[in-house]
Amino acid sequence: MKVIYAGYAKTGTKTMAAVFNEFGYNTYDFFEHGYYHGKEWRKIIYEGSTADDFRRMYKDVDAIVDTPIYIFWEEILEAYPDAKIIFCTRSDESWLKSFKKQMHSLATEPLYVFMQLFSYSGWGHHKFTQACGKSYISTQFYILYT
């Protein structure tokens, strides 16, 4: 592990992931965390973690960004003490506007909700978001279409 990007979602995570990829780094973004380690993250959320958990999960990864990294960056740093940490911030108003726009676009996209419920990886994402708390997407879809 070379870099832990500890900025919240909507603070340049996609841009930074693209930069890391351009450097030739094996980079895990939001999708990869859920796709490759969804079960491990659910276990971590419910039962806690050890440095060995993170070493095992990210042993061949150079850079990590986005959710849930910004929540667990200190624990991950214990596993990779030589990693560089990058924090990016954004004004509260700008961040909230961007976040709401993204959530609304997902909540109003029937294909996204369908895939979340009826595909294997989509179901994994749904379970992951439920483990993190109430699934905003499913709730908003239900409110909009009932």
Image (cartoon, helix red, strand yellow):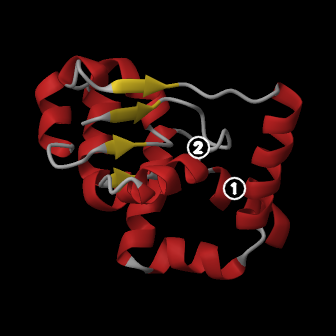
Q: Is 134 or 111 nearer to us in this picture? A: 111
Instruction: Provide residue 38's location: percent of width, then percent of height.
Output: 31, 53
Residue 135 located left or right of residue 142: left
| Labels in figure, total | 2
Which of the image's four quarters has the N terminus? top left
CA neighbours of label 2 inside 10 A, class few (<14), some (14 to 19), many (20+): few
Q: CA distance from mark 1 to mark 2?
A: 8 Å
Q: Is 21 or 76 nearer to us in this picture? A: 21
Question: Residue 139, labelled with which disc?
Answer: 1
Is residue 146 among the parts visible in the rendering? no
Asked if residue 18 is positioned above or below residue 10 in the image, the reply reads: below
Instruction: Provide residue 32's location: percent of width, then percent of height.
Output: 36, 58
Q: Is 142 or 56 nearer to us in this picture? A: 56
Amino acid at circle 1:
Thr
Among all residues in the image, which is located at the extreme front? 23
Which residue is depicted at the point 39% across and 53% down? Answer: 23
**SS for callout 1:** helix
Asked if residue 60 is positioned above or below residue 8 in the image, the reply reads: below
Q: Which residue is mark 2?
A: 134
Q: Earlier in the sequence, mark 1 or mark 2?
A: 2
Which residue is depicted at the point 48% across and 60% down? Answer: 126
Which residue is depicted at the point 12% across and 40% down? Answer: 56
Question: Residue 53, labelled with which disc?
Answer: none
Q: Are marks 1 and 2 in contact (CB under 8 Å)?
A: yes
**SS for callout 2:** loop
Asked if residue 113 is positioned above or below residue 23 in the image, the reply reads: below
Instruction: Provide residue 5's location: percent of width, then percent of height.
Output: 46, 34
Instruction: Provide residue 133's location: percent of width, then percent of height.
Output: 53, 39
Amino acid at circle 2:
Lys
